[in-house]
Image: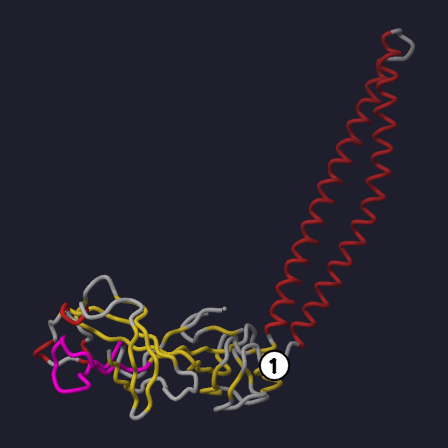
Amino acid sequence: MSMPRSTGMNRNRIIRNGIFTALVLLLAACGAGDGERSFTGQVEGRVYSVSSPVSDRLLELSVWEGDRLAEGQTVGRIDTAALELQRKSLIAGRDQIGLQLQELTLTTAQVKDTRDYYATTYRRNLELLKEQAVSDQKVRDLKLNADKWERELTTLRIKEQSLKRQQDEIGYKLEELDLMISKATLTSPAAGYVDQVYFEKGEFVPALRPVVELVSLEYVWCYLYLGESGIAQISPGQEMTARLGENTFRARVEHINSSAEFTPREVLTPENREALVYAVRVGIENPDGILKIGMPVVLEW
């Protein structure tokens, strides 16, 4: 099962490295004012945790740290022997219920025939009673028998419904087991690099614990925090340039928060802690994976 490490079953977690929760806000050049068109932000990216839905041994591990994986590529496999035994037990129980239903069908048919016989005989003798051709006691006895077999037939039909519900419940459990067995083959949820391997082949893996952590670096982003004058210089969709040493990358403003906030405490000095700013998310194209999570990059526009 694959999911971002900060959640549980196909959701991505956006991490922020170290104590810099949002952004390292530093002027790339000389000033500290919002009028500058060059700011330094910290690269952020998407991290995926590949985990198992069941607790058991790690039978296979086919990747290692630093490997580049394609989306859907096999990472490893969890032992499913216990799940397979549960599946066989459920199938045996389902087959047993099937035999009971077959037997019940035959019994129901016999009871229905008996009920129909007494019901038909009762109606016929009821007409004869009007002509005083039969005794009143005989008619009452026939009615009692017809009612008795009607109740028996109702009981059998209720039992049949109960067995069918049990059969359906087993079917649902089998579907759940089949899903867990299929997820025991761990695959990469996206293209990326193996950043961490937490378990070795043969080790016991608790349910939902990450086995491998992947980092996707093809597209990264960073946050800028700009005041009123700075926010007036940019707009969503605006092109920017991200710079790391001699390397440059295409960047674009993806989102500007609609409400102001205090600049993150971790990146402030006492003098400017009270400044209100707007968070700006800037996406950066990183096809060669040069930028890594946590790196500072200079954004220019």
Does 10 lie within the magenta span? no
Q: Is residue 84 above or below residue 300?
A: above
Left-right relation of 265 to 184: left
Left or right, 88 with respect to 225, comes to right
Looking at the image, the residue that sits furthest to the right is 133
Amino acid beneath label 1: Arg
Location of residue 174 with respect to 245 vertically, above or below: above
Q: Give neighbour class at mark 1: few <14, some 14-19, many 20+ (Cα, 10 Å).
A: many
In the image, residue 172 sits, relative to residue 1, either above or below, namely above
Which percent across, then down, holds residue 160?
74, 45
Residue at image position (82%, 44%) is 105
Q: Judge by depth and name the residue closer to the eye, 111 or 265.
A: 265
Q: Quadrant of residue 180?
A: bottom right
* Nearer to the camera, 195 or 108: 195
Mark 1 residue element: strand
Indicate yes or no whether the magenta region holds residue 37.
yes
Q: With 269 as the anchor, is 163 left or right in this view?
A: right
Q: Answer left or right for 182 relative to 93.
A: left
Q: Position of residue 254 (x, y in %)?
A: 32, 69
Q: Position of residue 282 (x, y in %)?
A: 30, 74
Q: Residue furthest bottom?
A: 246
Q: Pick the quarter of the image with the C terminus.
A: bottom left
What segment is highlighted magenta in the picture? 22-43
Q: Quadrant of residue 264?
A: bottom left
150 and 186: which one is in front? 186
User: How many numbered discs?
Assistant: 1
Q: Which residue is mark 1?
A: 77
How would you classify the magenta stretch by its main secondary structure? loop
Residue at x 77% of width, y 35% of height: 152
Which residue is rendered at x = 29% and y = 71% of the image?
Answer: 238
